Amino acid sequence: MQERDALLKKKVEDSAEIIPPEKLALLDPVIEKYQGSSSYLIPALKEAQEMFGYLPMEVQRKLAWGLNIPAPQIYGVVTFYSFFTITPRGRHTIRLCLGTACYVKGAKNMLEIITREVGINVGETSKDDRFTLEAVRCLGACGLAPVMMIGEDTHGNIMPSATLGILEGYQ
Amino acid sequence: MVTLTIDGVKVTVKKGSSILEAAQQAGVRIPTLCHDKRLIPFGACRLCIVEVTARGRTRTMPACFNPARDGMEVATNTPKLRDSRRLQLMLLLRSHPLLCPSCDAGGDCQLQNLVFEYEVPELSFGRQSRYFHVDNDSNFIRFNMNLCIRCGMCVRVCEEVQGQSELSFVNRGIESEVSTDFDRALDCEFCGQCASICPVGAISSKWLVGTGRRFELQDTSTVCAFCSLGCSLTLGEKDGKTVYVTSSEDSVNEGNLCVKGRYGWPFAYSDSRLTKPLIRKDGLLVEASWDEAIQTVAEKFGAIKKSSGPDSLAALGSQRLTNEEAFVFNRLVRTVFGTNNLDHAGGYAYRSLTDGLAPMLGYAASTNQIREIRGAKAVLLLGADLTETHPIAKNEINLASVRKKAKVIVVDSIRTKLSYRDGFFLDVPPGYEDLVVNSMLKFIIDEGLLDRASVDLRVEGFEELAESLKDYTPEAIAAALGLDADLIKAAATAYAKAETGVIILSEGLNRYRDSSPLSKAAVNLALVTGHIGKESCGVYVFGEKANAQGALDMGLTPDLLPGYHLVRDEAARSKFEDLWKGQIPASPGMNARDILKGAENGSVKGLYVVGENPLDTYPNRQRVQNGLSKLEFLVVQDMFLSSTANIAHVVLPVAAPYEKAGTFTSSERRIQKLNPSSKQIQGKPDLEIFMSLAAKMGKPELSYAGYSEVMSEIAGAAPMYSGVSYERIGDKGLVWPCLDDEDSGTSTLYEGGFPIGKARLAPAKLLGMVSRSSGSLKLIPCVLKFHSGSFSEWSPSLMEVCPPGFAEMSRVDMTNLGLNDGDAIKIVGNNGQAINLKAKESRRALRGTVLVPYHFSKNKLNSFTDWGSTEIMIQVEKA
C-alpha cells in the first residue's frame, strides 16, 4: 500500500527546461484576458497548459505576476488537479489504473513491464518524448480491470504480457 | 443577543457568535487544534464537536463554526464526545512521527497536550510513515512537514491576516502538505506568524532548534522598540539571554508581530555594541571610565556655556527614548544646559503631520485605535506604505478589505502592495497627496455627499473652507497631476458614502517639507464627511519609531514643553520652572535644522545627540557633516558606533530597549510599560546618564528614584497623562487622555465633542504650481519592512534577510536604459553625488521613479535629499 501511495503522489520537481522569455510572452494575451479576477485562474492555467503542454515554474510565476495571484496558490491548484502537470509530457500519456481492482488483477505487473521496457517511472516521460506514464486511482471501469488509457483510448482486460504489444500501436 | 446554556452555565452572547466563542465567554474550555480567534473558522480538526440539544433534538456538531442560538443546551464533555475526540487524536497520530522526545515543540505542543489530556492509548491500527518536505533553508523559520497535522492555520494566517499568501496547501488528499510553490525557501515578510501559530512542531523558529524548549524559557513581556504601533513582546530568555520572541494572543496586537519585532532583536547581542564610554584622545576614540567620560562631558559643556552662552549648546533627542527619558532629557537641556535648542528627527517629520491635527481637533495625535481599522468600510492611505512602514497596521487594512469589503484608496508615489486591494490607486508625485485630498473634498461638497449634521453641529469654518477649495476641481487637479478626474471622483464618492472611513498618514521619508497641509486636508475631509468621533473612523498618524508620539508629548521640541505647553507661555513656563527647580529661557530655541545650520556657522558649539544618527538620516548629508565636524564638542549617546558617533568627541553607550524600563506611547496614544529582561546591560540606561551628567554639572537635584517617579512627575505636568501612574498601567497599557485616577483612558477621541468646542476646519492653501518634470528620473527614498531607521543595520538577522545595495525600478525604465535585473547601476544626483547599486525590477516603482531604501549608512542616501524639497532628480547609468 505504501508503495502504491508513493506512486500516486504527484512528482514535484523543478522543470528541467528553461523557457526562454520570448516563448513566455505567449502568455501575455492569456493574462490580458483573465486579468483582474482571481476566479479565472483555472481557465488561464488550462490555456497555458494547452500552449506549453505543461505548466513549468516560469509559466506559473508569470501567471502569478500577471494575474496578481500569489504563486503558492497557483501551485496549490496545479498540484491539486490531476489534469495539470508540471513536467513536460510525451506524445502519448499512459494512464495506468492502480485502483484496487486493477491492482489485484495485474496492474502492478504491467507497471513493472512499462517501467522496465520503456524506461520510465510514474510521472516521468521517456527520453524520445513518446510516452508519459501516469498512475491514476480509478478510471471508472473496474469491470474491465486491469485498465489503462493511452491518450483518449481505453484498453481493458489486459494480460500483463500483452502490455508492450498495445504500446507498439503508439509511436 | 442570544442566551444559551453550556455545561449548565447560562451565557448571553452577541448574535452571530459561534458556540465556541459563547463557551469561552462562559468559561468552558472546548479543545481545538485548528482554531484561532484571528482566523475565520475552518472546521478541520473536529475536536471542538459538542452535543447540542435544541427543540427536543440532540445533535453533534463542531462548535467553531456553528452559531449560538437562543435556548440551546450545549454539552461539551460527554463520554461520547470524549470518545470521538480520542479517535480523532488517534487518527492524527497514525502518521504523526512520535519523535516527541526530540521535537522542539515538546511541552508546547497542543497535540501532545490533548493526547495526554484524553489519555489516548496505544493505537489499535497500524501507524504509517509518510515523507514530506523539510525546509532548513528559509531565514528564521524551519519547516518539517512530517509533523504537520493539516490544521491550515499557517496558510490561513498568512493569507487572512498578513495578506501575503506565501504558503498554500499543495497536492491532494493524503499527500497534501503545506508548502510554497515548488518547495522553494520562503521569500516573504518573514513575520513568523506561521511559526507562532503552528500548534505542533511542523513550523518552528530556527533559533530555538536545539536551544531550549518553550517551558524552559523565562518570559518577560515588554514593548517592541521598532515602529510606533506599540506591539507587546514576550521575550523568552534562557541562561540570561533572549533566545525567542513571541507575543501573547491576549496582547493589544493579538499576538501578531512583524519581522522586526519577532526576529530583529539580535542587535542587542551584537558584537558591535559599545560597552564602555569612548573619549577622543589625539584624534582617536579610546575607551574610558564612566566617571571620566561624564566628567569630560560636564566640563566641556560647562566651559562652552560659560564662554559662549547657553544658546551655543544644543541637543537632539530621539523617538526611541522612553517617555521618562525624554522628559528628563528635556529638563536637563532646558534647566541645566539652559537652552531651548532641543529637537529630534520627529520634530520635522512626525510633528508636521500631528501639528495639523491639534488646532483643528484639540489633540495632536491619532483619533482612534489601530484595531478599529478592521471595521472600516473605506480606507484612505495618504503616502502611507504600511506594508513596509507599519506591517501590523497593514494587517488591519487587509482585514477591512477582505472581511468588510472596504474600498482601499491609495494616494502615493509608490505602487504599494495595498494598492492592489479592491479600491483605487491615485499616483501622485512625492509630496502632492494633499492636492488629491482637497479635490476629493471639493467634489464631495459640490455633489452634496457631505454629512450635513456634522458640518452644521460639530464644525466651524465651513464657508471659508469651501471658498478656499474653489480651484481644486477634480478636473484641474487631475490635469495637474496626470490623473483621471473620474478616479478622483469615484474615490471621493467611495470614502464619503462609506458608513465608516479611516484616513491614515504615516511619517515617511519623502516628507522633508512641511506636511501640515496634508494632515489638515485629511482632517477637513474626515470632518466634512462625519468620519470622526466614531468607532472605525478618524484620522491616524503613524510615527516611524517606537516613541514618536511620546517624544512630542514630552516636548522634545524647541517650542513645546511636556504636555504641549508653549515655552512662550509665561504661566506654563513658571510652572515647569517650579517643578524642575531651574530657569527656562523664555523664547523658543532652534529646531534641528537650525541647530545644524548653527553648527555650520559657529553659533552652536556643543551638541548632545541622544539616540539619533543625524549624519546618516538627516537631509543634506554634506551640510550635516560640515556642521557636525565644525562643532567644538559633540557627544553621542548610542548603543553602537554609528557614523555620527564615529566623529564625536565623547560616545556614551546605552542600554538596549530590552534591557530597560520606562514607557512608550504608541501611535494610538497607548502608554505601555517596558520591562527589562536581560540583566546583561551593556552601557547604561539613558535616564541614569542624564542624572549623573546633571549632578556633574552642578544640579544634583535633577534626580529620580526610578522610572515610576518620573511618570508621576509627568502626570502632574502633562494634562493628558494626569491619571497615569505605574500602578495603573496594566498589561494593555493606558490610552491618553487619561485625566484622573478613575479614568480608564479614551480610546476614541471626540466621541462626545471636541475639547476646543467645535472642530475648526482649516482653509486649503492656495493651489500653487505643480512641477511635473518629465524625462528625468526621480529618486524616492523609501522604507522597507525589514528595517527601521539606520539602527536596524546592527541587527545581523535583519541584514541577512534584507541586505543593502539595490534600487527598485520599473520595467519600462529598465528597458529604456537597457538594464536587466541585477545589473550594476550608478545613480548620480544634481550635485554630482553618486552611489553604486544594483537595479532590481519592481512593480513598486512607478515609471520615472527609482526607489532606494534609506536605511543603509553605506548608501549615504541623504546626500541626495534636502530640507523642504520632495523631488530628487537623478541620472541613472550603467556602472
Image (tube, rainbow, N blue to C red):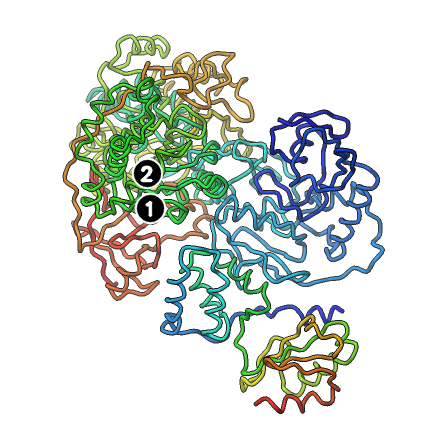
B42 to the left or right of B522: right
Q: Is residue B344 visible?
A: no
Q: Name the secondary structure under disc 2.
A: strand
Q: Quadrant of residue B127?
A: bottom right
Residue plotted at (26% across, 60% down): B813
Horizontal and vertical percent for residue B50? 75, 39
Q: Residue at x 62, y 80 (%)?
A: A94
The chain that hosts pointer 1 is B
Query: Where's the C terminus of chain B, which quadrant?
Result: bottom left
Q: Residue at x 76, y 56 (%)?
A: B94
Q: Tell me where residue B328 appears, x and y as whole percent.
A: 39, 20
Locate residue B39 relative to residue B280 in the image: left or right: right
- Parent chain of label 2: B
Residue furthest front as drawn: B55
Question: Counting other residues with Cα less than 10 Å from the Cα at mark 1, is it few (<14), some (14-19), or many (20 or more)?
Answer: many
Q: Is residue A13 above or below residue B33?
A: below
Q: Are marks 1 and 2 in contact (CB under 8 Å)?
A: no
Badge 2 amino acid: Leu
Which dot marks residue B425?
1
Q: CA distance from mark 1 to mark 2?
A: 11 Å
Residue type at mark 1: give it: Phe
First of labels 1, 2 by sequence position: 2
Using the image as rendered, state which of residue B308 and residue B443 is in the foreground.
B443
Q: Quadrant of the N terminus of chain B?
A: top right
- Please give the residue where the numbered disc 2 appears in the rendered image: B382
B846 lies above or below A59: above
